[in-house]
Image (cartoon, rainbow, N blue to C red):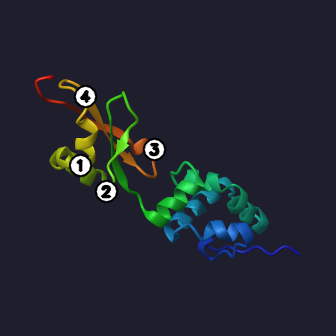
């Protein structure tokens, strides 16, 4: 006998690896996944298929939610999105300011008002010559597409 139920994804009882993955998602994210599933499976989905989707296709679920991978989604839900500042002059590896910022705006304000006084930045630029440039990047710890070159700073001085 088949029994069909019409229930919210938030109330579904996942098991094994499906439960582990489902526990990572917020209620709002579960609602988004439910909307995707309703589009993909207008006649419904069997419970084993649903559990397996969460267990073995978790990257697909993360993609529906705007993440590149399930690991990225999990990091976002546990740590939150943070922004860091990196600087590089194309001659060395990029250096990252140790401070994290809660928003892009906070990171930009730091660059505009405090970066040149930052000890890591000072140490990085002390061997550069006048006229050299340093690209200042603002990077998301979650979404790589949120990484962008905020500005280029030029080293001032007489060149000696």
Above or below for 111 versus 26: above
Above or below for 90 versus 1: above
Q: Is residue 134 left or right of residue 92?
A: left
Residue 133: image tag = 4
State the image coordinates of residue 134 (x, y, percent, origin top left): 27, 32
Residue marked by disc 2? 101
Among numbered discs 3 and 1, the one appearing first in the sequence:
1
Residue mark closest to the camera, 2 vs 3? 2
Do the residues under discs 2 and 3 have CB atoms within 8 angstroms? no
> The residue tagged with tag 2: helix, strand or loop?
loop
Above or below for 87 versus 66: above
State the image coordinates of residue 10 (x, y, percent, origin top left): 59, 73
Residue marked by disc 1? 119
State the image coordinates of residue 116 (x, y, percent, origin top left): 18, 44
Residue marked by disc 3? 144
Disc 2 versus disc 3: distance between alpha carbons?
A: 16 Å
Disc 1 versus disc 4: distance between alpha carbons?
A: 18 Å
Residue mark closest to the camera, 4 vs 2? 4
State the image coordinates of residue 47 (x, y, percent, origin top left): 76, 68
- Residue at the spot 23% in from the left edge and 25% down from the top edge: 132
Disc 3 versus disc 1: distance between alpha carbons?
A: 26 Å
Do the residues under discs 1 and 4 have CB atoms within 8 angstroms? no
Among numbered discs 2 and 3, the one appearing first in the sequence:
2
Above or below for 112 versus 131: below
């Amino acid at each position: 006998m088949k029994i069909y139920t019409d229930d919210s994804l938030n109330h579904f009882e996942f098991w094994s690896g499906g439960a582990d993955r489902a526990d990572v998602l917020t209620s709002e994210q579960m609602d988004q996944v439910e909307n995707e599933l309703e589009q993909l499976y207008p006649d419904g989905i069997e419970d084993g298929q649903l559990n397996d989707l969460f267990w073995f296709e978790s990257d697909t679920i993360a993609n529906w939610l705007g993440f590149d991978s399930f690991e990225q989604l999990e990091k976002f839900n546990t740590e939150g999105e943070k922004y860091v500042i990196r600087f590089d002059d194309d001659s060395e590896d990029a250096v990252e300011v140790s401070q994290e910022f809660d928003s892009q705006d906070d990171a930009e304000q730091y660059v505009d008002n405090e970066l040149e006084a930052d000890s890591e930045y000072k140490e990085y630029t002390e061997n550069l010559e006048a006229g050299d440039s340093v690209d200042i990047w603002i990077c998301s710890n979650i979404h790589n597409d949120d990484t962008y070159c905020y500005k280029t700073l030029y080293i001032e001085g007489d060149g000696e």
